[in-house]
Image (spheres, helix red, strand yellow):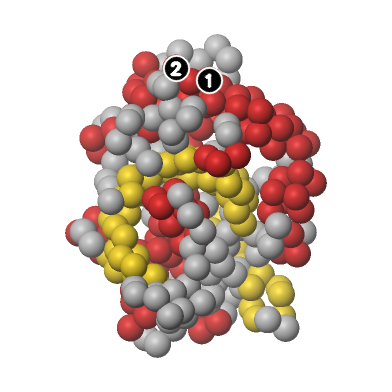
């Protein structure tokens, strides 16, 4: 089983990403299948998240944010079965257990004076030997964000070294919310067209610290765009119980982009191919 951790700043879309994955089996039953791949929720926590997912994806409400209160033991594991059906090959089934961390854990990494033992406990758990890989979600791309993110990831890679995980932990960096017009054209070559273009300091920090075999860059979108010939984001912002939330503009046109690829690579160390 692939044992994956997700980190990223607040607002980077971690909860929406997991909610979309949990909700995917319902979409499959409604006939909205992704060619060559099938997703299944494997535990109660994931099924519970799927029931709540419509509030994020369709209704504009929000799930409670992940917090540090209660410690690591209070964080659920979301477990998925991914069946991949490559052309002319036997189907491949992998199980993935995913746990995401509060955004403040990532943000504290950028604070050189931070020494919160509870926050360190989360980082220690993220870098345990049993963890196969870490998915880091980022959502912003301006210069100030690049400085902040490069500082946070520099500290994270130092923690990888302390835990002896530099050479045996896969790290996937994903630009989330790539349905935005500024980012959508760069989704096919994210390392060049997104990270090198918008987050050069972050890119340099990662490439200097992590070997190329253990580092991949992705673009993902929980909401996707309206269609092949209409690349407007299939997302709009509404006022919900938790403030301003993103919801689907056209629920019947929902087609998330790139959700499974990083999870598959983090679990297997190879590219997801199902066509």
Going by the image, does 202 lie left or right of 220? right
| Residue sitting at the far left | 44
Q: Residues within 10 Å of mark 2 (few under 14, many from 20)?
A: few
- Regarding residue 49, the answer to whether it shows in the image is no
Q: Residues within 10 Å of mark 1 (few under 14, many from 20)?
A: some
Question: Which one is in front, 218 or 55?
Answer: 218
Query: Do residues under tags 2 and 1 come within 8 Å of each other at their CB atoms?
Result: yes
Going by the image, does 91 lie left or right of 206? left
Residue 101 place in picture, x, y as percent:
40, 39
Question: Which one is in front, 269 or 188?
Answer: 269
Residue 182, by quadrant, is: bottom right
The total number of labels drawn is 2
Residue to which mark 2 is pinned = 162
How far apart in space, not on screen, are marks 2 and 1 (Cα)? 6 Å
Residue 123 place in picture, x, y as percent:
40, 27
**Label ID, residue 158:** 1
| Residue sitting at the far front | 88
Query: For the residue labelled by badge 2, is the local secondary structure a helix, a strand or a loop?
Result: helix
Identify the residue at image location x=65%, y=59%.
Answer: 178
Identify the residue at image location x=59%, y=75%.
Answer: 249
Residue 258, by quadrant, is: bottom right
Residue 128 place in picture, x, y as percent:
33, 30
Identify the residue at image location x=58%, y=34%.
Answer: 211
Identify the residue at image location x=51%, y=84%.
Answer: 252
Question: Relative to 162, does residue 205 appear above or below in the rendering?
Answer: below
Residue 1 place in picture, x, y as percent:
28, 51
């Amino acid at each position: 089983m692939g044992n994956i951790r997700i980190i990223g700043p607040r607002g980077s879309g971690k909860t929406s990403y997991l909610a979309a994955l949990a909700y995917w089996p319902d979409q499959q039953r409604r006939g909205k299948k992704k060619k060559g791949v099938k997703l299944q929720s494997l535990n109660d926590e994931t099924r519970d998240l799927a029931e709540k997912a419509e509030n994020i994806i369709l209704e504009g409400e929000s799930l409670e944010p992940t917090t540090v209160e209660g410690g690591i033991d209070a964080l659920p594991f979301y477990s998925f079965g991914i069946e991949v059906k490559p052309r002319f090959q036997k189907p491949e089934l992998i199980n993935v257990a995913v746990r995401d961390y509060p955004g403040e854990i990532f943000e504290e990494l950028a604070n050189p004076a931070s020494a919160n033992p509870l926050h360190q406990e989360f980082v220690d758990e993220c870098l345990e030997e049993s963890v196969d890989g870490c998915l880091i979600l980022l959502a912003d791309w301006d210069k100030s964000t690049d400085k902040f993110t490069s500082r946070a990831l520099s500290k994270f890679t130092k923690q990888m070294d302390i835990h002896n995980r530099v050479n045996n932990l896969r790290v996937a960096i994903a630009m989330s919310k790539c349905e935005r017009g500024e980012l959508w054209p760069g989704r096919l070559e994210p390392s060049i067209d997104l990270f090198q273009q918008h987050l050069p300091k972050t890119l340099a920090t990662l490439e200097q610290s992590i070997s190329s075999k253990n580092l991949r860059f992705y673009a993902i979108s929980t909401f996707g765009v309206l269609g092949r010939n209409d690349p407007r984001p299939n997302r709009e912002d509404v006022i919900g119980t938790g403030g301003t939330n993103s919801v689907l503009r056209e629920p019947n046109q929902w087609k998330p982009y790139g959700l499974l690829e990083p999870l598959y690579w983090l679990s297997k160390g190879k590219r997801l191919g199902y066509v």
